[in-house]
Image (spheres, rainbow, N blue to C red):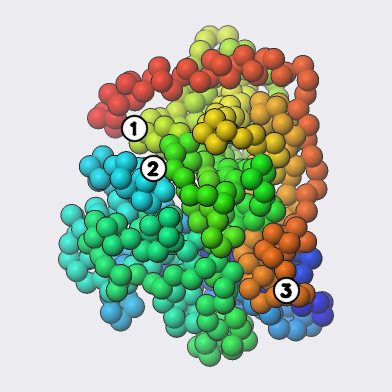
Amino acid sequence: MSRPYVIGIDCSTTAVKAIAFDADGASLAEGRAPLTRSSPHPGWGEQSASSWWEATAAALRSLTEQLAEAGAGEPQGLAMTHQRESFVCLDADGEETGPAILWLDTRAGDQIARFGTPEIHALSGKPPSTTPSLYKLIWLREHEPQRIAATAMVADTHAYLVHRLTGRWATSTASADPMSLLDMSTFTWSDRLLALAGLDTTQVPELVEPGAVIATVTEAAAAATGLPTGLPVVAGAGDGQCAGLGAAAVEPDHVYLSLGTSLTMGVQSGEFGTSDSYRTLASPIAGAYTLEALMSSGMLSLGWLRERVADLPDSAEGVAAFTALAETSEPGSRGLLFLPYLTSAETPYWDADARAAFVGLGDHHGLGDLAHAVFEGLALETRLLLASIEEDRGTSLTRVTAMGGGSRSPMMLRVFADVLDREISVAAEPETAALGAAMLAAFGVALDGPRSLPEVAARMSRTEETVAPSGPTRQLYGDLFDVYRTVYPSLKAAFAGLARFR
C-alpha cells in the first residue's frame, strides 16, 4: 500500500464514489455515500447541491480512513467526474436560489420547441433535447425570473464541487459543455447562448482544459474530507466522457458502450462537427471531441419490466429470476419487438414525445418473450446508433468496450454481440467513470512520470473478457434490424398525438 496513487471521484445521480487508484489502474480502496432526488411535479428532477458536497465529503472521509488504516500514505492528486447537465443557481453568498435541476428533468419541452434551432445545434454541438441545461435555464428565466435575477453563479456539478474543495470558481470544458452554453468550435462560453438563458460571463465559472491542475485543497475542505491540505485538484470531465477514457477508447474506431440506467456510446474525433446522429462533446483529451449517442432508457427499461410487470425485486435474486424468464424465449422473441423509449427518444430522432412500445404482441407471447424482447430492443437500438454514426462519418467502428451494470450480465453481452455482429470486450474495472477521472488526475500530476493522456489510459485500463457474436443468429438479426428501423417512423405521428393525453 506504499504505491503512489490518485483519487477519482464520481458524483452520479444516485451516489458519490471516491476511489483510490495506483499508477497501473488497480483500485486500492473505495468510499461511497448515497444521494436522493425529488420530483415535485411530473417530469421534474431536483437535488440539493449541498447534498453533492455532503456526500462527496462523506465518501472521501470513508476512503481516507481506509487508506490511513492500510498505511497508504497521501494521494498525489484527485479529479472528478459527474452527472452531466445538472446545474445549480447560487446567490452572491454561494447559497442556492433554488434546488439543483438534474439532467433527467423534462420540464422544458416548450422551450426546446421554441429555441431548439439548427443555429443553436451548430453553435453548441447539441441537438435540441431534454438533457441540455440551456432549455431549463430559459424555463427559469420565463417562469422564475426572480431566481435568475438573484443568481450570481450558475455551476455544473464539477464547478460546485471544485469550489467546495478549493474555493475557486472553475470547471473543466469537458464538464461545462453538456450544458449547451459553450461555443464548441472554440471551447469558450458563448455570449449568444448565455444571453438566451438570461446570463453573462460574470455568472459562470472559469473554464480549464481537462487534465490541467485547477487549484489545491483548502484547510477547510481538508478538515471535512480527510484529504491533505494543498492536494492538487485536476480538471475532470463528464461521466460519459470519463467512462470512455476509463475503457481506453481513445482511437477513432473504438466505441465505448456504457450500459447503465441510460445507455451511452461514443467515439473520439479530432474535428468539430454536428449531426442528429450524435451530440458533440468536449473530449477528456484536451482540444478533441467526443461524439456521443444516447438512449435515455437503457437498463431502466429492464428494471421497469422486472419490477412493474414481472413483480420481481431489485435484488440479485430478482435480476437472476428475470434473466431466467428471458432465457425461456429465443432470438427474435417469436416476432415481438420492443422500442426502448420509456422517457423519450434521443439519438438520432430527438423526439421528446416518443415513448416505448411492444410491436407484434400476440396471444402466443408470454412474459419471457416480453423480457427477451427488451434485451433485444436495447441491442437493436444500439445497432441503430452505431449505424447512424458510421453513415454520418463514413467510417467503420470496429472495436467495442462495454462497461456499467449491464456489462456484468452474460445474457446482455451475448445478445449485444449477436445483434451488433461485433466482438464486445468488457472493462475490468466496474467503476470505469471514476477510473477515467483518476486517469486525468494521474496525467495532471504526472504520476509515474510524464506521459500523454492516451498513454496513461492504456497503462491504467484493461479488459476482463471478450464476447464474440454467434454465427447462426447473424442473418436473423440482420433481417430483424431491417424491420426494427421502420418502427419509430411508423409510430412518430401516434406519439405526438398521445402526448396530450398524459
The residue pinned by badge 2 equals 127
Q: Residue sitting at 57 percent across and 77 percent down?
A: 213
**Viewer can see residue 62:** no
Please identify, in this view, whether the residue under mark 2 or under mark 1 is nearer the observer.
Answer: 2
Q: Secondary structure at mark 2?
A: loop
Q: Position of residue 197 (x, y in %)?
A: 25, 58
Q: Residue sitting at 56 percent across and 63 percent down?
A: 286
Q: Nearer the viewer, residue 40 or 2?
A: 2
Q: Nearer the viewer, residue 366 or 56?
A: 56
**Viewer can see residue 357:** yes
Q: Nearer the viewer, residue 237 or 416?
A: 237
- How far is disc 2 from disc 3 in space, using C-alphas? 37 Å
Q: Quadrant of residue 386?
A: top right
- How far is disc 1 from disc 3 in space, using C-alphas? 49 Å
Residue 42: give its label. none
245 with respect to 44 (left or right): right
Q: Are marks 1 and 3 in contact (CB under 8 Å)?
A: no
Compared to residue 424, the image places residue 329 above or below, namely: above
Q: Residue sitting at 61 percent across and 83 percent down?
A: 231
Q: Secondary structure at mark 1?
A: loop
**Mark closest to the chain's N terminus, 2 or 3:** 2
461 with respect to 337 (left or right): right
Q: Residues within 10 Å of mark 1 (few under 14, many from 20)?
A: some
Residue 353: give its label. 1
Please identify, in this view, whether the residue under mark 1 or under mark 3 is nearer the observer.
Answer: 3
Q: Residues within 10 Å of mark 3 (few under 14, many from 20)?
A: few
**Mark closest to the chain's N terminus, 1 or 3:** 1
